[in-house]
Amino acid sequence: MAQEKNDGINKNMSLPPIQQKRPALSWGLKIKKKVKTVPSFLGKLRPAVGQCCHQCTPDSLSKKLGRTSFLGFRNLLSIDDKQTRYRGWLVRRVCCVLFVSGRKVYGHPVSDRMERVCQSSRVKEALAADHKALEEEDSQGQSSPLSLFLPIINTCISPGLLRFLSWVILKVFASVFGGIQVNLNHLPVLHKASQEGAPLVYVYVRQSVLDCSLIPLVLFCHNLRVPYTLCPLQIQSSFLRSVLQKVGVVLLPPNMAELETEGHPLYSAVMMSLLRELLHEGQVLSVGVSAESGLGGQWLDRIRQLIKEGSVPDVSVVPVGISYDCVTKTNVQVGLRSVLLRLLSVLWKKPEGTVRIDFAQPFSLKEMCESGRCSVDEWLPLQDLLLPVILNNRSNSVFGKRRMLWLLPSLFASELEEVNQSDRDLSIAVILHFIFSTTSCLAVMSTSLVSSLLLYRHSKGVSMSVLCRDVAWLTEELLLRNRDVGFGGSIPEVVHYSLTLLAPHLFIAATPPSREDPLIVPRPSSVLHLSLQAQTVVHTFMLEAVGACAVLAMICEVVFTGLNSSVRTDGVNGKEVKGDMEFSVVLGQSELVEKALQLCHLLPPGVMPPCQSSQSFALDAVDSLVRCGILIMEEISRDVPICDFMKREGALAWTTTDDPYHSDSDCEEQESCSYKISQPRQCPDMLFFLCSMLAGHLSALCWTIKTLDLMDAPMAEAEFVSWVHSHLCDTANQKKQHYESCSKEAAHTAVRTLIDLGVLVEKRQTGGNFLGVSPLFQLSENREKLHRFISQYLYN
């Protein structure tokens, strides 16, 4: 177990020894003498992450075991003779083999699973709907279309093969990572939950192809049941498919993409029946969900449907946070040749980065779905929420939550007419909640922290001493927001380790006057990689970022339109408002919350919990700026005191206690306070630091709107997304900014937002799904209004 230094950041966490001893940068740790370490109290407190949602699953929250002592972390790759029953010189040479052979494996034969799946009513109905299945039958009485799914149904777990592959993976990961840190405080809860009867379902957000192997490896090494992994990879090699299917990996059919399989009615019926049989056998599942497209969420909805119809009593969902120092991106196509080349390459490759794995507290899926507390807002189309504000300049927004039907792609294509909209909205709310819960328990790695500072605070470059100072400040801010960090050691060691991993993406120069204090500048071509690393920090500060962009939008009204009813200045005329921001500006509470509420509808999925109303999230966003010191609350002078209720004009509006939005402040006037921008020296830097976090997402939206001027005819959706992606890259290179908007995920998210807004219209044709500009936005005036509305939140 890693030990902490006296001047460390966090207890029982340190950098891998192989990384500490490698002098990757010429200046080494000379800056250590100049920089103070983090205050000692940060090493005594560790945030309690991974708790159940207090609103959706209060019963599951009460089942949490009391933590009597801090168990710390364990490096999964550090295996010695102490973890075996034997001791000695020879044992230390073969300790990994002895460790793997001593693990408990819950093997289970397939037995008659094939017959049970084929005899299910759901599969029989799907076969009856297939005309080819009625015409062709083999000698065993099974329809030929099922032959494609027979290997998937026969997926099993072979104890001997599982032990061998676990030993191979441990050896391979030792050459890839410096360490795999597992939070031991969550494992006793998992052991207890595995004995209570309800099958466990592990949910994680897809980041890399290694996600599928990390979770089974950790569970295997801690004597927990290895899950059946629902893997989205396209593997063409029949040998690899056969091996993986014998260790519990449920693969896609050959030559079929994930999205294509969901439109196949027979595939959906077979997978529903297979999940039912696996859960009846008491097996454990592992599901990955994509935060951009929602792919993988259909598996969770299938499980929810099984619980709803009574086929499965209940399951315990366990969100899993997998945090990488360096996210490994690999092609989706996996073959035998590519795997062998990968194994050969790691033999001479030095380990880079660590991985941190956190298991959240298990909770009941049945409780979440049947309690009715998962969603508090009415789900409305995005065009109903924002178009009246954008096109008609309406001051008040419609209260509701953005409906994202694309998060559940083509599920039960033959039964969509039978599924009511409220049930589909509940499924989407559950998927969004899982994405949010999983992302919330991710630890912030040192590379994520340094990348966020270089992108959003020091994009023009920063000296080493200033970077170390900001790392200490940002670490404290993260811990105060109940977000754990996945690193330890002194500040110079943490910064040196991070810059070693990020060195290919940075310019590091030592100027002659101060060679011991080098200058670090991010490479423009690597901004996209740094923004990917900084996503966990952005998720932590999402409340503050929304509030900061709302403040920026109201300041823009002062700069471009002068004084109005919602913004006033003290002692400064409208013509005297300049860009230097050296004036006292006061923002009305209702207008500021309204700006934040409108911005909430444009956020990508998974950044705000669906069990919280959009209005409440906007209010919290404004309040968070007060806690940060950016805004100062001040009362508006009144002729009649607020406490004098009887002298107010009109009668009091009494409300019932059943009203979910009822509060003691409902009887007050709408604008009871206002906010004044703080004037300390660090306030503008903090405000712009928060605004920059959403600049990539908003600029991608603005640039995508500009591409509509060049669109002559409807295009296929995949072709249009590729065209938008190319345009985003060209625009970023031309403007020399917002390179983080050039990812394919940003293009996909921007296109989906414009579809939800009604800017783009989907037309299903024989060649696929085509996109065209709606008649309303074929007018350049309306497109300009939309562009102006989004760009008001954009910080350049």
Image: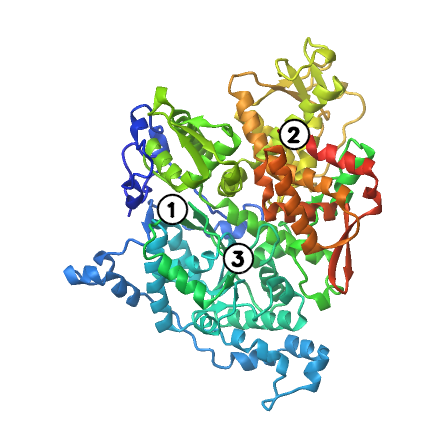
At mark 2, the secondary structure is helix
Residue at horizontal 72%, vertical 47%?
A: 378
- Mark 1 and mark 3 in contact (Cβ < 8 Å)? no
The mark found on residue 353 in the picture is 1
Where residue 239 sits, quadrant-wise, is bottom left
Disc 1 and disc 2 in contact, CB within 8 angstroms: no
* Colour pattern: rainbow
Q: Residue at x 52, y 68 (%)?
A: 251
Locate residue 80, reporting x and y percent: 23, 56
Label 1 – label 2 distance at C-alpha:
37 Å
637 horizontally vs 70: left or right: right
Asked which quadrant contains residue 796, the reply is top right
Tell me the crowding category of disc 1: few under 14, some 14 to 19, or many 20 or more residues within 10 angstroms, Cα based.
Answer: many
Picture residue at 35% right of the left edge, 35% below the top: 496
Give how far across and how far down residue 156 sits, in percent. 45, 73
Of label 1 and label 2, which has the lower sequence position? 1
- Looking at the image, is mark 3 or mark 1 earlier in the sequence? 3
Q: Is residue 78 in view?
A: yes
Label 1 secondary element: loop
Q: Look at mark 3 in the image and give the residue it sits on.
A: 288
Q: Position of residue 42 (x, y in %)?
A: 37, 33
Percent x, y for residue 402?
Answer: 70, 45
Residue nearest the observer in this picture, 381 or 341: 341
Q: Give amino acid for label 1.
A: Gly
